Image (cartoon, rainbow, N blue to C red):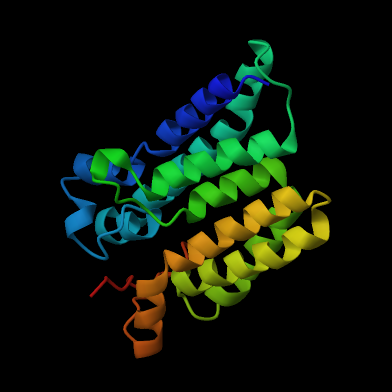
């Protein structure tokens, strides 16, 4: 395998992940999401500031850019004859997209928390782990309406279940690292949860008014 070509594809994955859809959508709606609400460019903050359907759009786009990094770059590498498809390579490309999202070079290396992007990787590589993470998220989010709590729980569920369903220890460690990074990105949310100051986000079918970020 040509190391230079591999690193080139990893860089492409990072740049693909670095597309700040939340920031772009916010600007389209006349809001700089970095300076309002929680200051995060992720789907939850965009939904609070611009409307829930804009938030869902950002989640979908952040999800798909990581999924595309996993499968698209692998296919490109195969077609060009640079490398053969493998689970390890798909994880590398996916992780590069998450890091690009979390540390966006176009926004001073400030980005989101990588929840949607990590979900895109899971669906593309470990669909059973994706299901476990999704169910864990819903079990913690639905009774509380705290997206952050559901996301943290989902990261823990991912870190545990990946060791059950994944036969490759390297891949399992990689997903465990992603879970750890995801939890670290929620440190401020954890502080607000403990202080009782974390804003709630109502599910899409709720008729009640959504709480804003304080």
Residue 101 in the figure: left or right of residue 96:
left
**Nearer to the camera, 168 or 128:** 168
Residue at x 50% of width, y 60% of height: 181
Quarter of the image where the C terminus is located = bottom left
**Nearer to the camera, 79 or 149:** 79
Residue 57 in view: no
- Classify 9 as above or below 79: below
Quarter of the image where the N terminus is located = top right
The quarter holding residue 93 reads top right
Residue at x 49% of width, y 36% of height: 65
The quarter holding residue 153 reads bottom right
Residue 198 locus on image (x, y percent)? 35, 79
Image label count: 0
Residue at x 61% of width, y 44% of height: 121
Residue 151 in view: yes
- Classify 55 as above or below 12: below
Residue 16 locus on image (x, y percent)? 44, 32
Residue 174 in the figure: left or right of residue 180:
right
**Nearer to the camera, 73 or 50:** 73
Residue at x 63% of width, y 10% of height: 80
Residue 14 locus on image (x, y percent)? 45, 35
Q: Residue furthest bottom?
A: 195
Q: Residue furthest front?
A: 3
- Classify 64 as above or below 74: below
**Nearer to the camera, 177 or 209:** 177
Residue 32 in the figure: left or right of residue 173:
left
Residue 59 locus on image (x, y percent)? 45, 49
Residue 171 in the figure: left or right of residue 211:
right
- Classify 135 as above or below 126: below
């Amino acid at each position: 395998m040509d190391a230079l070509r591999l690193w080139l594809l990893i860089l492409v994955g990072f740049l693909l992940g670095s597309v700040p859809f939340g920031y772009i959508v916010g600007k389209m709606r006349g809001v700089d999401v970095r300076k309002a609400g929680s200051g995060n460019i992720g789907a939850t903050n965009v939904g609070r500031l611009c409307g829930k359907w804009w938030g869902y759009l950002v989640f979908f786009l952040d999800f798909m850019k990581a999924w595309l990094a996993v499968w698209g770059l692998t296919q490109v590498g195969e077609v060009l004859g640079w490398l053969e498809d493998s689970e390890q390579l798909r994880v590398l490309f996916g992780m590069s997209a998450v890091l690009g999202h979390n540390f966006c070079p176009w926004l001073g290396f400030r980005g989101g928390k990588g929840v949607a992007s990590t979900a895109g990787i899971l669906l593309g590589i470990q669909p059973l782990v994706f299901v476990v993470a999704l169910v864990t998220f819903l079990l913690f989010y639905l009774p509380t309406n705290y997206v952050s709590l559901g996301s943290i729980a989902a990261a823990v569920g991912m870190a545990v279940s990946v060791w059950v369903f994944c036969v490759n220890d390297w891949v399992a460690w990689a997903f465990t690292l992603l879970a750890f990074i995801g939890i670290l990105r929620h440190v401020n949310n954890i502080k607000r949860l403990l202080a009782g100051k974390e804003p709630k986000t109502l599910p899409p079918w709720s008729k009640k008014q959504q709480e804003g970020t304080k």
